[in-house]
Image (cartoon, rainbow, N blue to C red):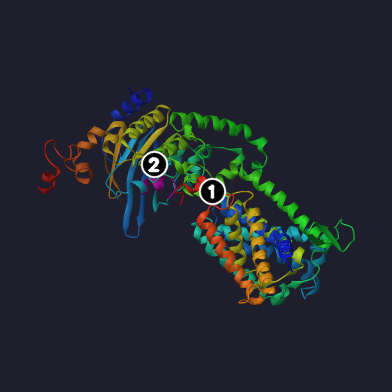
């Protein structure tokens, strides 16, 4: 173990599967919170719906005692249909959340979404046909891995970075999807539609007084951000081939907010930069502390304490960032001069 | 010198009797039995009031008279407990604000609602009606809306020139001064080409120099054929610019008429103006301390 290994690990994680999962969910939050000002504190609900849809349709329906008179396999013949269903379910979730709350003040959405996230997690955890407390494990992404074009070999080396055949395929596809969604976000947000969203963020009543149906635009933003969240969950299920209820905790959403604010809200590239830096720092601090413990520089810590301590240190770093650069890394300094809030 | 439409409005209102609920020759907005309660408090209880088309009508009254609540009801930002109102011949009782705005009835707010983290130009463009690019699907296909956007931008620039904000077009609206924000809000409302504009205290917090130019803008708006209704506490402005004054107190319309007539009305003096409303606070040569000690 040396500094080179620490850096390699950090870089691998900064652009790896976990970073992609968080990034996709954060890009959804950017549309909802960054551009439209919707306080969605339950992005994990959309992620869980996406991930569980893949797990249930691809694994549970084939094995568990679901009523046999339903043609499960015809309904979901392959992964691609399951993905369509997952996206559809996330739209339905957005409608259920949005119809009652989007007419109310912004804080109601925050309360409802955070509760929804927990309800969904606990419902999955306590329902055995949906995986129960064991979650769902199995080859739910097989259709995707079958398309892997890379030659059969054990490892692929890119400088210091090393990938297995499957990991390489997953990570490349993840970043391609992210690239397309960034393009979509950019196209939407430079348009008059995006301008209405930003207007809603600043003052909804002013936008209503100018003849815009703000309720419709808020619903569209909630659905679009929810779809991004579902894609994050779908990617999670495929990449990890495992869906666990205990991973679907509210902290996921809070990390997404951290990433968004770190990178710069209402900036197309904000979440990308935020996710990469966040995961780099988190892994770097962990690995670096482990290295120091390993070679005897630090004697007052044991390796099991490193996990919590890295969050403390990264949290401290983020607090400093908020004090000295509250608009985030990509944020506009000019905005700070305003008494916007 | 008053323009054509101003002269028309004055002559049209000349024959109207100065009493609450008086019928007007050509009303654009008619409210009937509009009331709103907050618990036991009757905030608004207007039996009948008409606003003349093409005129500048002032709505005055003491604090808590229900002027702003009445505005909120008429513009759809609050729901009435009873009553009906008709705008340009169509019943619009409790219609959503964005639908009213599309029909040409636009309002501004007492506490200015400039969209701080949008540029002045974006604020203006948001005002334009019927934008194709505001439909989500169409928004990713710029060829559908870029021509329209360009036209709106040119129109916005003309308005910004007129309101002396052109140099600020690319700055955030949040960087404007209070008075400039009032101007921006008015200019933004004009992007919709309204037929009725309702201004809630347009002069609040505006310095005297800017007041004069705001008054001129209000006159210009009317000369372009837009009816103006405004809530205001600044009596000089009311006297100066309005053709007709409606006075509210305790939720009711207690008087209306031409400004000079209304200001002499005993009910209005009792409820709102006070007996010495047209006198200076201190006479020349008299010190402030003497005035207050007596």
Residue B137 is marked as none
Crowding near the residue tagged with mark 2, few <14, some 14–19, many ≥20 C-alpha atoms within 10 Å: some
Residue that numbered label 1 is attached to: A214
Read off the magenta span: B69-77
Residue B280, magenta (yes or no): no
To which chain does the residue with label 2 belong? B
Percent across and percent down for residue A123 are 64, 72
Residue B70, magenta (yes or no): yes
Percent across and percent down for residue A238 are 77, 63
Percent across and percent down for residue B279 are 17, 37
To which chain does the residue with label 1 belong? A
Q: Residue at x 56, y 51 (%)?
A: A36
Please name whichever residue, B224 or B175, is drawn nearer the observer in this view of the structure.
Answer: B175
Residue B178 is marked as 2
Q: Is residue A42 visible?
A: no
Which of discs 2 and 1 lies nearer the camera? The answer is 2
Helix, strand or loop at label 1? It is: helix
Q: Main secondary structure of the magenta part?
A: helix
Corner quadrant of residue A170: bottom right
Q: Residue at x 67, y 56 (%)?
A: A228
Q: How many marks?
A: 2
Helix, strand or loop at label 2? It is: helix
Please say if A22 is above or below B162.
Answer: below
């Amino acid at each position: 173990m040396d500094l080179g290994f620490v850096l390699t690990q950090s870089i691998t994680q900064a652009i790896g599967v976990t970073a992609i999962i968080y990034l996709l969910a954060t890009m959804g939050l950017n549309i909802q919170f960054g551009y439209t000002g919707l306080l969605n504190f339950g992005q994990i609900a959309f992620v869980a719906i996406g991930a569980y849809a893949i797990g249930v349709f691809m694994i549970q329906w084939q094995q568990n005692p679901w009523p046999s008179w339903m043609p499960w396999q015809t309904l979901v013949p392959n992964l691609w249909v399951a993905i369509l269903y997952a996206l559809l379910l996330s739209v339905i979730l957005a409608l259920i959340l949005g119809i009652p709350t989007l007419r109310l003040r912004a804080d109601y959405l925050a309360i409802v979404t955070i509760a929804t996230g927990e309800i969904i997690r606990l419902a999955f955890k306590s329902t055995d046909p949906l995986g129960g407390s064991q979650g769902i494990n199995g080859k739910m992404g097989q259709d995707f891995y079958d398309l892997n074009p890379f030659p059969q070999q054990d490892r692929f080396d890119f400088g210091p970075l090393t990938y297995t055949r499957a990991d390489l395929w997953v990570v490349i596809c993840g970043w391609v999807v992210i690239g397309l969604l960034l393009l979509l976000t950019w196209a939407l947000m430079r348009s008059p539609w995006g301008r209405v969203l930003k207007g809603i963020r600043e003052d909804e009543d002013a936008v209503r007084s100018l003849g815009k149906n703000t309720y419709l635009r808020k619903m569209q933003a909630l659905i679009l951000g929810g779809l991004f969240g579902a894609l994050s969950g779908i990617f999670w299920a495929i990449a990890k081939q495992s869906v666990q209820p205990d991973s679907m905790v509210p902290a996921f959403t809070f990390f997404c907010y951290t990433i968004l604010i770190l990178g710069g809200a209402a900036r197309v590239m904000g979440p990308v930069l935020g996710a990469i830096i966040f995961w780099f720092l988190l892994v770097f601090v962990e690995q670096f502390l482990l290295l120091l413990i390993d070679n005897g520089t630090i004697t007052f810590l044991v390796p099991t304490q490193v996990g919590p301590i890295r969050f403390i240190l990264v949290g401290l770093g983020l607090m400093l960032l908020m004090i000295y650069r509250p608009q985030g890394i990509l944020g506009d300094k000019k905005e700070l001069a305003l008494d916007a809030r | 010198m008053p323009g054509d439409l101003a002269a028309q409005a004055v002559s049209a209102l000349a024959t109207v009797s100065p009493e609450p609920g008086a019928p007007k020759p050509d009303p654009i907005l008619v409210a009937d039995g509009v009331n709103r309660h907050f618990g036991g408090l009757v905030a608004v209880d207007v039996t009948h009031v008409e606003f003349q088309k093409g005129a500048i009508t002032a709505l005055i009254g003491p604090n808590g008279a229900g002027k702003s609540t009445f505005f909120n009801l008429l513009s759809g930002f609050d729901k009435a407990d009873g009553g009906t109102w008709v705008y340009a011949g169509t019943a619009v009782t409790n219609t959503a604000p964005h639908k009213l705005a599309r029909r040409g009835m636009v309002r501004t707010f007492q506490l200015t609602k400039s969209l701080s983290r949008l540029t002045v130009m974006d604020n203006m463009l948001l005002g334009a009606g019927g934008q194709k690019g505001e439909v989500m699907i169409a928004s990713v296909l710029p060829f559908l809306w870029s021509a329209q956007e360009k036209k709106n931008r040119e129109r916005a620039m003309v308005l910004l020139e007129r309101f002396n904000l052109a140099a600020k077009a690319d700055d955030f609206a949040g960087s404007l001064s209070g008075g400039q924000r009032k101007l921006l809000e008015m200019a933004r409302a004009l992007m919709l080409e309204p037929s009725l504009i309702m201004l809630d205290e347009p002069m609040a917090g505006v310095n005297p120099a800017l007041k004069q130019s705001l008054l001129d803008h209000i006159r210009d708006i009317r000369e372009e054929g837009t009816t103006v209704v405004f809530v205001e506490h600044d009596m000089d402005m009311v006297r100066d610019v309005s053709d007709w004054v409606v006075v509210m107190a305790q939720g009711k319309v207690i008087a209306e008429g031409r400004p000079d007539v209304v200001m002499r009305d005993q009910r209005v003096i009792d409820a709102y103006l006070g007996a010495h409303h047209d006198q200076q606070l201190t006479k020349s040569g008299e010190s402030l301390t003497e005035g207050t000690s007596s």
